[in-house]
Image (tube, rainbow, N blue to C red):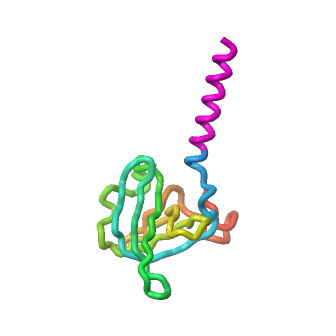
Amino acid sequence: MRRMLVAVASGVALLSISLAAHHATAVFDLGKRLTLTGTVTEWFWANPHCLLRFDVKDESGQVVHWVAETQAPPNMIPFGWAKQSFTGGDQVTVTLEPVKNGQPLGRILQVRLPDGKTLVAGAPAIPAGEGGGGARP
């Protein structure tokens, strides 16, 4: 009986570690912000994370394909996000925390839509340089 209890406890501990790793923010350069203006190519509204794909021209005029994530749809709805928030071809300005390895990936902090409305991903973002170097609450 004791062995079974130890085995179950070990399994729960391992599962907890893997779940925590999935939701960790270690891949993002927390506090660093990029603001990019580009064209939406796809808006994927699904669990466990919504994904916004958009194209941005870099300094040399080359198109860079960005992918940025948000939280799950149920967490985004209270902040005004919807399955219909974006359409392919929309011109948007995305503020995100990029990944540390320099790939065109990141976590969305906010998006300004073509009509000027701003969607915030969760609690309002703290401007960079205030309250911990731009970290979100």
Numbered disc total? 0
Task: Classify the position of the N terminus by image quarter.
Answer: top right
**Where's residue 80, x and y in %?**
39, 57
**Where's residue 55, x and y in %?**
40, 74
What residue is rendered at 41% in x and 55% in y? 50
What residue is rendered at 40% in x and 70% in y? 54
Q: Which residue of the protein is positioned furthest toward the bottom in this rendering?
A: 60
The quarter holding residue 79 reads bottom left
What residue is rendered at 50% in x and 86% in y? 59
Q: Is residue 21 left or right of residue 84?
A: right
Q: What segment carries the magenta color?
A: 1-20
Residue 88 or residue 117, whichever sits in front: 88
Residue 113 or residue 17, whichever sits in front: 17
Residue 135 or residue 48, whichever sits in front: 48
Residue 91 against residue 49 in the figure, above or below: below
Q: Is residue 102 left or right of residue 87?
A: right
Task: Classify the position of the C terminus by image quarter.
Answer: bottom right
Residue 135 against residue 10 in the figure, above or below: below
Is residue 19 shown in magenta?
yes
